[in-house]
Image (tube, coloured by chain):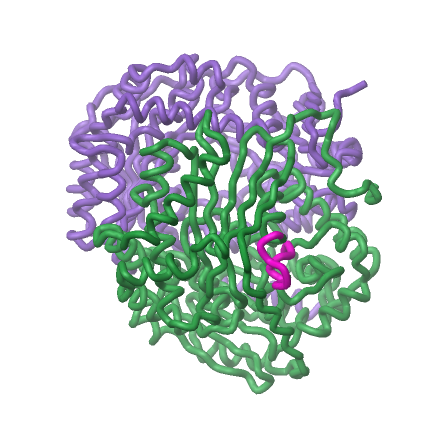
Amino acid sequence: MILRLTVLLLALIALPAQAAPDIQHWTTDNGLRVYYVEAPELPMVDLRLVFDAGSARDGGRPGLARMTNALLASGAGDWDADAIAERFESVGAQYGAGAARDMAWVSLRSLNDLDWFEPALATFLAVVQAPRFPAADFERTRRQAFVALSRQAQDPGEIASKALYEAVYGDHPYAHPPLGTRESIEGLARGDLVAFHARHYVARNGVLAIVGDLDRPAAEALADRVSAGLAASEPAPALPPVPTLDEARTLRIPFPSEQAHVYLGAPGMSRGDADYFALYFGNHMLGGSGFTSRLTKAVRVERGLSYSVYSYFLPMAQQGPFLAGLQTRVDQAEEAVEVARETLATFVAQGPAAEEYRASLANITGGFPLRVASNSDIVQYLAMIGFYDLPLDYLDRFTDRIEAVTVADIRDAFARRLDPERMITVIVGGPEAE
Amino acid sequence: MRTKALLAVLLALSLLVPLLSAAGETGRSIEDTHEFILKNGMKVVVKEDHRAPVVVQQVWYKVGSSYEYGGITGISHVLEHMMFKGTSRYPNGTFSEVIAEQGGRENAFTSRDYTAYYQVLAADRLEIAMRLEADRMRNLLMREDDFQRERAVVQEERRLRTEDNPTALTYERFQATAYLNSPYGDPVIGWMQDLESLTLDDLKAWYDRWYAPNNATLVVVGDVDPDEVRRLARRYYGTIRAREVAPPKPRQEVPQQGERRVTVKAPAELPYVLLGYKVPVVLSAETEWEPYALEVLAGVLDGGSSARLSRNLVRGREIAASAGAGYNAAGRLEGLFMLDGTPAPGQPAAAIEAALRDEIRALREAPVTGDEIERVKAQVVAGEIYQRDSIQHQAMVIGTLETVGLDWRLAEDYAERIRAVTPEQVQAVARKYLVDDRLTVAHLDPQPIDPDNPPSRFDGHLR
């Protein structure tokens, strides 16, 4: 009792200043949107350049977006792959790249001392603006993609995830794996990558996030240099909306593993969705908050069925998935699926309890400072805010928006948005059915 | 995510950033780091970082899988799971609930040389985390039904991480082959049969034996006033009585006398090869610079895409789809310099083993170039700044060094020592340690992925 009181008092009195970073935003002359936070505490700079160039843009050639992104640093300007790597690493810079379904990104972390930063930036600019996609590197990267596919095929969790997306999204561009398929990768030509880069790695299809020890004029000059070498061109067109699921389906995929990997899924929500805060908050209690979430209590703590069990909404440009996952010994799979489904259905039917709501609210709002505690956290938020065109005060208002959500809002949003009777269930593991 | 039991494994397998090279300290930060010892022997290290209003508390115990012996492997990690099961004052899940209500994140991890618990939360809430963490150092309740369920969870964790993961399974058997008498041969998560035969009494005894303030280090990094942390530490941890803790037996690995090999058959699509050479660590090195030369050597092989393995094996000769090298200088006992690789399509596993050995031979035969060594040093210098972006990472470095028996100040002159390494020293450690008689090789031999014919790795008595 004494503890509770102290906790409450602390929560009332000592709410930390919800100091979100001061985000500055502008657009360069040829249309690249820039998001910048000055962070003078450490002598370093983080850049994250994102394009609407994820696998949803593969256009019938699964794997194209991912391979285009992977090849950027394999030859650009006057430099081959070895030279590019040397140029980054000889000044201690860290280059990164990747592509998911919506977004493709290229990132750079460097010291801000100009002797170190300039060579890194010059290399980064060439990689983004003038990649050459050398034929030999293309062939090698394609062979490596086959290895990545094999790695996926020996991993029951990966098999389950792939099957889930395909079942949830049907003919939608979110359905196919970003890595592609053996057939599609065999069908890719170097020219496809050149064309994909020319179409999608353009100023008006991108967002640049900058965080670090540089002032506004320096950030503007930097953004102009990134932008200047990109064609202005056009943003990618909107993706088609995601169709709703007509009926529940269960897919069983045999695999010689000791555990069954289980996913439940359905189309969830988009970034900027009107129900975003209600669904995020609700899922926090359902399966998003680790040990205090309902799924963990039911599946792990009370029954010892799984090491990891969780649920999340992955907000994307169109409706990203709602997804719940667990892994359990093959002979326990049916029981675990039953418990997870029942937990989900109960939550959708009844909504959160008052005490659960209060605790979850305290966690989300009290934990806000942790979300923006490092430059790497902030640069990712900037890129996300820019890419999905969220309001500049998204972080400032985050806790207020959460606090405005009521128990009834959550119950209402879940009832409208998540139908336990129409979900996909994927179970990978166990022998072929009799 | 409760347990990163295989953190050490991941560090070794990801084989990218040697642990010590990640140490983010500069001369200035010595002023920001404060050390003191409570009367009961508990060491406290506080590092100020005022960039954001957050703090991390970590409590590190000197116990992990390398303190275990045959028949009870995995007990340190199971105990870590049980530490979330409550005390009389904060029963059941209260610990996690209170931290969550404070907006905190918490977890724990077990490795070969340590078990550690942490909370990250708004800086003004440190006291709450301390009150809870100090309470479970001494007052843990362990109940049979909790234990039965939590053991089942750990067994699921082992199935997830090891049994159904062919490369992790290969790594486990590789370690068991490389070490004859060192406890590093046993997996952190424990052998399945040992987990099965573990009892609640075993756990209670393990807790009583190792969980004492004089066997623990408190690390606090964040937006805190060190005097205030000292006051809180005295209040919450300082009142716990010291206990006699007998140090573990030495169990240094006997000298290896010839190459060892092991093959692991598992359902898989891809072959995989692991090589490990017996090498000293900072604690055991006869010559002070040798571990640092080994770190530089790891960087020359795998310090980014310009390093030799990427350049020569992944691009260049295109023998590997991926290849890595790594070395952890901060072990309690002697360890391995490791290399691993997955062959490129059409390449046999033997080719990648040969190619990795060619790279080692080249390091024995000729000194590395000035450019290569300068690149490694540049990455270390920059890395020291980058690592300061994460308070958790800074705390990890301090906690690891202290808990294996080194000193957190070692991180302070790490870059200095790396800068002092010469090409000749790199060649000297290659010649002395990276030799066939110190080598263990493991091959994953992929078996058909046939759902009706699963491997039976243990006798089915678990059902």
Residue B61 image position (x, y, % from top left): 60, 69
Residue stretch rendered in magenta on the structure: B177-188
Q: Can I make out residue A28 in this image?
A: no
Q: Position of residue A58 (x, y in %)?
A: 40, 18
Report the residue at 68% width, 46% height from top. B158
Image quadrant where one finds the N terminus of chain A:
bottom right
Please tell me which residue lies in front, A282 or A110: A110
Considering the image in quadrants, where does the C terminus of chain A appear? Answer: top right
Farthest-out residue, bottom: B39
* Residue at point 24%, 55% (across, down): B374
Residue occupying image coordinates x 51% and y 73%: B405
User: Considering depth in this image, is A336 or A10 the residue closer to the camera?
Assistant: A336
In the rendered image, the vertical position of residue B234 relative to residue A116, given as above or below: below
Query: Which residue is nearer to you in this view: A25 or A393?
Result: A25
Number of numbered discs present? 0
Q: Colour of chain B?
A: green
Residue B3 included in the magenta stretch of the image: no
Position of B364 compared to B264: left or right?
left
Magenta stretch holds residue B181: yes
Q: Colour of chain A?
A: purple
When asked about the image quadrant of residue B234, the answer is bottom right
Residue A125, image x, y percentages: 21, 36
Q: Residue B62: percent from the left, percent from the top?
A: 59, 70
Please determine whether, in this image, residue B12 is positioned above or below residue A139. Answer: below
Please say whether residue B120 is visible from this viewpoint.
Answer: yes
